[in-house]
Image: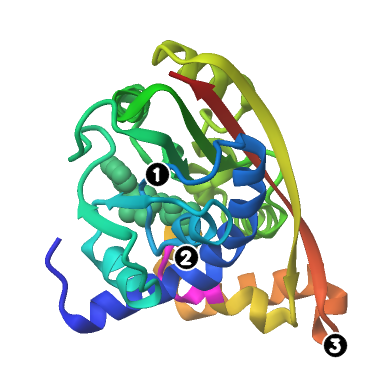
Amino acid sequence: MNQNPTQLATAGEAYEPLTGRWSRMVAPLFLEWIDAGRNGRWLDVGCGTGALIQAILDAEEPKEVVGVDPSSAYIAYARREIRDPRVRYEVGDARALPVASNQYDAVVSGLVINVLPPSGQLSAVREMTRAARRGGTVGAYVWDYAGGLAPRALFWSVATALDPAAEELDERVQYPICQPDQLARLFQSAGLHAVETADIELEATFSDFEDYWDPFLAGYGPASAYLLSLPADAQQALRDRLRAELPAAEYEPFRLPIRAFSVRGVK
Ligand SMILES: C[S@@+](CC[C@H](N)C(=O)[O-])C[C@H]1O[C@@H](n2cnc3c(N)ncnc32)[C@H](O)[C@@H]1O
């Protein structure tokens, strides 16, 4: 990817308010659950703006953390935010990781598996497994788009009620891999042992309606892309309907539940 400096700044900044802020809440809970041990060598696949890397630094006393992502814009954001000599970055693809085999105590990935095309998901987990040392941990988490991501589900239920054509973009049906049984099967198919899954439940907090709505205008992800494709009057209609669905949001902070599914296995 070739981006100018403005794009480098804005890609990460568009990501953070819509998803990064929740990813930063899931990451420590996920690390506690995978329990991969302190002082290890870590690989974070699809590291994006660095939510999981920061959580690893905070909790795991790692010897080393390598972040891989195809987006040089996200890596630029992460480099700017995380200044720690134990961290290095590689621009690269989960399906052909630019790292040596059998090196890492823990290979992890947050909110990435479902953004890969279905045909590439198994290759990615095989690559994660290749990078892990024997006995090392491989783990990942994804949102429960179908039933447990209320801020986004609300957006799509209103969008599809106003415009049935929005259905083909609706994230609630786009990601069949985001189910515990599918994740477990994927990890087993990659040759991992002792595969387990868990739910991670959180609450998303919003200071007011604008705090909920404005991130959809920033251009990150399918919901934002859909919204920005609409003419101004349709954007306004969607905003008004969402506002009506969240009556308390005009005056006070509010919360919506979010859930991630996590999966881990041993090489
Ligand atoms: C939802 S973001 C998650 C970022 C970060 N892991 C987090 O938890 O905040 C999805 C990430 O997957 C990355 N991604 C997309 N395609 C990828 C691929 N083929 N290989 C590796 N990462 C990819 C994106 O660039 C983006 O950083």
- What residue is pinned by disc 3? 251
- What residue is pinned by disc 2? 224
Compared across the picture, whether 29 is left or right of 233 comes to right
Check residue 217 for magenta coloring. yes
Residue 123, quarter of the rendered image: top left
| 214 vs 57, nearest the viewer | 57
Q: Position of residue 8 (x, y in %)?
A: 25, 75
* C-beta proximity under 8 Å, tags 2 and 3: no
How far apart in space, not on screen, are marks 2 and 3 (Cα)? 25 Å
Magenta stretch, residue numbers: 215-220
- Image disc number at residue 42: 1
In the rendered image, the vertical position of residue 183 relative to residue 110, given as above or below: above
Front: mark 1 or 2: 1
In the rendered image, the vertical position of residue 147 relative to residue 4, given as above or below: above
| 72 vs 108, nearest the viewer | 108
The residue located at (78%, 61%) in the rendering is 256
- Image disc number at residue 225: none
The disc labelled 2 sits on which kind of residue? Ser
Mark 1 or mark 2: whose residue is earlier in sequence:
1
- Asked if residue 81 shows in the view, the reply is yes
- Pick the quarter of the image with the N terminus: bottom left
Q: Is mark 2 within 8 Å of ligand 1?
A: no
